[in-house]
Amino acid sequence: MLTLDRAAQTAQSYIHRVLEDVEKRNPGEAEFQQAVKEILESLVPVFAKHPEYEKLGILERLIEPERLVVFRVPWVDDEGKVQVNRGFRVQFNSAIGPYKGGIRFHPSVNASIIKFLGFEQIFKNALTGLPIGGGKGGSDFDPKGKSDGEIMRFVQSFTSELSRYIGPDQDVPAGDIGVGAREIGYMFGQYKKMRGAYEAGVLTGKSPGFGGSLARKEATGYGLVYFMEEMLKAHGLQFEGMSVVVSGSGNVSIYAMEKVLELGGKVVACSDSSGVIYDPQGISLETVKQLKEVDNQRIGAYINTHPHAELIEDCEQIWSVPCDIALPCATQNEISETQAQQLVANGVIAVGEGANMPSTLEAVKVFEQHDILFAPAKAANAGGVGVSALEMAQNSARLSWTFEEVDGQLKQMMQSIYRQCTETAEEYGHSGNLMAGANIAGFRKVADAMIAQGVI
Ligand code: GLU
C-alpha cells in the first residue's frame, strides 16, 4: 500500500511538471491547456503502474502535435471584394491510423481551439476501436449570412491549400460546427479536381449519392443516446418518461433529440446562439428540422407555429430549465460551474456530452461531487467519427452498406465504448468515473502503439 502511494505521488509530481511545461510552451492557449489538464490528471494511476512510460517520453510526445499547418485563405465576396481568413489543420497523432477529425468554420477558431479539438480526437478515435489517428482543422471564417456562392468560393480556396496535406491514407477530414454535407461536397469537388483522381476516402460526411455513408448524419446524436442508454440501464434507469434538455439545434442536437423521442423521453428545450426554446408540451422535432435543415432560420421562429412555447433570448439560460437529463450538444465550455450547480439544484440525474468539451473542469467537479451520472464527450460523442471510419471502410471496399447495417454497428460500437470506460475505470481504482475510464483506455491504446513503433 505504502509503495503504491509513493508510486502515485511520483506519478502525480511528474504529471504536474508536464502540465507546467504545457502552460509555458503554449501561452494564451486556454482551451488547449484545459483539454490537456483534463486528460493528464486522470492518468496518475497509469503512470503509477507503468513508470516506464516516463522514460519513453510518451506524454511529452503526445502533447506535441506531429504537425500544425496554418495558412492564408483569400476569397472574393459577392461585392467583388477580397476577403482573407486563416486556415488550420493539426495532425496530432498517427500512431493507430491516418489523422482523422473534422473541420470547423466559426469566428472563434484559432490555434488553441484547433489543438484542443485535435488532442481530444486522439483519445476519442482510439476508443472507437477503429484504425484512426487524431487530427482537426478549421477556419475563423463565419458562414453565418454568407451566400451559397461565397461559401463555395471560400471552401475552394481553403481546400486548394489543405489538399497538399490530406489523402485517404494520410489525413481524412470531415465536418464539425459550420461544416456539413454542402461544404464537404465543395471540398471533395476541389480536391478531386486538383488531384485528377477520384479518391472517395479522402473526406467523410459526403452525401450518400457519391460515397457518403448512410447514418453518418445521424451518428453523433444517435451514438450519444445509445451511450446514455447503456449508462442509464446500468443504474436501473431508462429514457422513457424522462424530461430532457438538449442545447444547440445543429446536427448533433437534432439527431440526439430524435433518438430520445424514439426511446420515450420528452425533450423540453433546445437552443441556438440567439436563444432558448422552452416547450413544456415537448419540443416538436419536425418544426426544429424544418427551421434548421430547410429554412435556415433562428430558433426563435419556433414560437410562430407554437405560441404556447417560451423564447428566452439568451442561449446561456438553457441550463436553468429543469430536467432529468441534460445533453450539451452546442459547443465547448457551455456549462460553467454555476450552470452545473443550477442543473444539480434542479434535480438533474444524468449529463451526456454531445459537443466537444462542453463542461468546464469546474463543472465536471460539481457533477462528480453530486454523483451525477456523467458521460464524457470523448466517449459519448465518438459515434460521429466512428461512422466516419465506417465510411472510410465502405469507400475502400467500393461498397455502400444499408442504414440498418451502419446503425447496428454504431450501436454496438457505443456499447463497447461504454464497457471499455467502465471496465478501465474499475481496473484503475476509479469505479464509476467514466471520464477517467475514457481517458485511460484511449491513452493506453495510443501509448502502446507509440511504444511499439519506436521513437519517431
Ligand atoms: N467533428 C466530429 C468530432 O468531433 C467528427 C469528426 C469526423 O467524423 O472525422 O468527432
Image: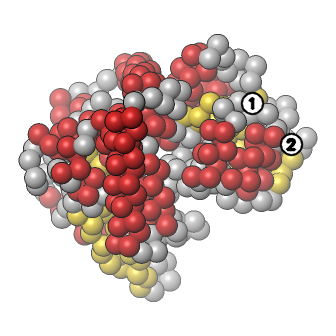
Q: Residue 214's spot in the image, x, y percent?
A: 39, 30
Q: Which residue is mark 1?
A: 324
From the viewer's perspective, tell me whether residue 54 is left or right of residue 270. left
Q: Residue 49's spot in the image, x, y percent?
A: 30, 35
Q: Residues within 10 Å of mark 2 (few under 14, many from 20)?
A: many
Can residue 136 be seen in the rendering of this structure?
Answer: no
- The residues bearing labels 2 and 1 have C-alpha atoms spaced at a distance of 19 Å
Q: Is residue 302 above or below residue 405?
A: below
- Residue at 11 percent of width and 55 percent of height: 456
Q: Residues within 10 Å of mark 1 (few under 14, many from 20)?
A: many
Could you tell me which quadrant the N terminus lies in? top left
When asked about the image quadrant of residue 73, the answer is bottom left
Q: Which residue is mark 2?
A: 309
Q: Is residue 151 above or below residue 11?
A: below
- Residue at 66 percent of width and 17 percent of height: 238
Q: Residue furthest left?
A: 454
When asked about the image quadrant of residue 387, the answer is top left
